[in-house]
Each structure stands twice: as C-alpha cells, then as structure tokens.
Image: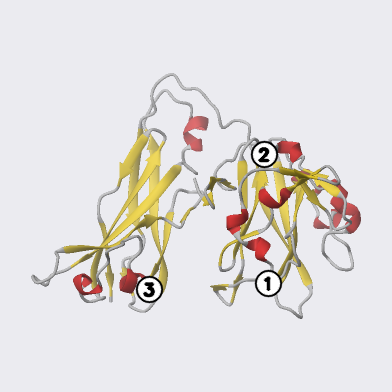
Amino acid sequence: MPLINTTEVVDRNSRPQVQSRVMLRAFFLNDGQYQDPYAISSVHVFKRTETLSPSTVLDSSTQIVASESTSNAAMVFGPSSNGIVGEDTSFNETNYTGNVVAVTPPLLPDCTGASGIYKLNTGEFAVVLNGISASSLSGIDQNGDPIANTASQATRYVDIWTVKLTQGSDWKVYINDVELFDDTFFSVTEPLLLRSKNKLANRQVVNGSKVDLKIGTEVTVENKNIDSSVKNIFKSALITSATIQIQKVNEDPSLPGRYDIVNAPVDYVTADNTLIYSFDTDSTLKNGDGIPSFNEDKRGTKRGTYAVKVTYNMISEKIVSPWMYFIVK
C-alpha cells in the first residue's frame, strides 16, 4: 500500500472499502509536464447520484461549487492557511498522522492532523477520505460551517477540486470519480492459485532523459472452481509492497559485471497492476537511488545495458520477477 508520511493509505483505484483511509490523488500537468497549480481552494466530495449533471452543484455564473451546495457534500477538504501552494505549509504531507484531534472551542474535530490537501510531489496532490474515523472526521465548508464525513456507503462518489492554475487566472474545477466497496472481504473454498507475468515496456532510454519505466503485470487465477466474479477482482489493484532493483551490466573486465544503481520502492502501481518508476538518467545514474555506498566510477559509462527486477506481494506470496533489460543510448 502507498504511504503518506508513515501511514498506510489505499489508492482510489484499489477497490477501497468504506472503512479505510482512501487516498484521492490528483495530478496536474501543463504543456505535458507535471506542474503545481498556483492555489488550491478546496476538495468537495459528493455522492455520484447527486452530481449526474455538474450543474447540480456548480454555480451557473462562476462554474465552481455553489455555496448553497456545500451543505450537501459528503466531505470537504481544505488547506489550513491561504491555499497558495508555494506559501501554504499545510500542503506538506508530513503533517499527516491519521488521527483526529478534537479542539475547543467549539467542540469540533480538527482535521489538520488527519486529512487536508497534501502535496506529494510536483503536480501531485492528495486528500485522505478517512473512513476509519468516519463521522468524527470533519471539514469546514466555504461558509465556515462544519461538514462531517458522511461518505460511509458503498457507492460512487465524485471529488471536485477547485484550483487556480496561475495567479491571475480564474478558479476552475476538476471532477474525478471514486467508488467505495463493502465486498472486499470474500471467502473461497480452496487456496488461491495465482500466477503473474511481468513485462518491461521500455526497451531504450535516451541518456539525459527522465522517463517512467513501466512494468506491466498479468495476473491469472488458475483455480477452475472459483467464480469468474472473484477472479475479476484480481485483475486490478492486487500488488502491494512493490520495489524495484536496477543494475548496470558492464562488459569492461576492470569493472563489476553488475553494479546496483537502484534499490527502492516503485513510485506508483496503477489500477491494472502496472508498476511505474521515474527513472532520471541525470540524477539516478549519478547518485543512485537507495544505494548508500553508490560509486559512480564502479557504474562505468552511463550508456549501455541495464537490468531491471521487481519484487512485490500478492496475497500471501512474495513475487520476484526475472531480470528484464533495457538500453541507455
């Protein structure tokens, strides 16, 4: 599972159950690159059935969440300061503890330590819909009124992000989907027979570039007696605790035949079990990643053949993939 600070959260694409800490992540891009917006005002969570048309919650003139609609929200998240990304320290994800702290007066839950809007990386932000705390978690709407978390049903929701892209631009909303489940527990009558196959999508990487290494995972449930509805669950969001190892393969006899470049967690696991690692040929090949004793001289030239291996958990199994290869040219 991904972490915010040291607290485990469940990604929105991982069939999250109602009573879990669900990370609602949003990525912002400009001209093909991840970029921080200037400011984030709020994140509203509504039931999908109440927002089949955006006009049901958006103001017709401003096209942002109408003040009279916020009382219908299942939860509202906001930064604790001015919402300007470059100035507001409340975006720091290390503030997340997963706990709800009551403050007085008034006697309302303070969501600062449990859920707010957090910056995870450039252009990457998240809120945590904390179903473990349930209705004891509360946010404050734009009218200053408390909004208790009522996202407690196994149904579809939308999270509406109100964002100002640049200092002089108008506020805009971005609407995403998330579904909570209550059927994440199930029973089978025999041990699951799982088989996985990994494939590296990247074959060549140009030296000086920064690319996402993408390792696809095909998961097969080989039990003949298990219903297809259960098997379909394992086609998505099955991988946990994924790490990646990258080695430089040297042909020079004066250098180690293989030298560790990376030994670190993967950056992201998609809903279809694809593992993603951001590979920066300038930074990673110069300093290593997760290698305390990295020595650039032992690496040899940057150009050449590299070997990749991923390790991850599936249910009770620990899977180690075969080595896969790509070339930096």
The outermost residue toward the front is: 104
- Residue 65 locus on image (x, y percent): 83, 59
Kindly identify the residue that appears in the image at 46 percent across and 41 percent down: 238
- Is the C-beta separation of discs 1 and 3 under 8 Å? no
Q: For this view, does 319 lie left or right of residue 297?
A: right
Give the residue at mark 3. 283
At x 68%, y 35%, the residue is 154
How far across and down, in percent of the image, does residue 305 sit?
A: 23, 68
Inter-mark Cα distance, 2 to 3: 39 Å
Q: Locate residue 7, reporting x and y percent.
A: 55, 46
Q: CA distance from mark 1 to mark 3?
A: 27 Å
Determine crowd level at label 1: few under 14, some 14-19, many 20+ residues with C-alpha closer than 10 A.
few
Quarter that holds the C terminus: bottom left
Residue projecting furthest to the left: 253
Neighbor class of circle 2 (other Cα within 10 Å; few <14, some 14-19, many 20+) is many
The part of the image, by quadrant, that contains residue 163 is bottom right
282 or 191, which is in the foreground? 282
Q: Is 41 or 57 nearer to us in this picture?
A: 41
Question: Which quadrant would residue 190 be assigned to in this image?
Answer: top left
- Disc 1 target residue: 87
Residue 125 against residue 158 in the figure, above or below: below
Q: Name the residue at 26% across, 75% down.
A: 302
What SS does tag 2 mark?
loop
Question: Distance between the Cα atoms at labels 2 and 1?
Answer: 30 Å
Name the residue tied to disc 2: 131
Give the mark nearer the N terminus: 2 vs 1: 1
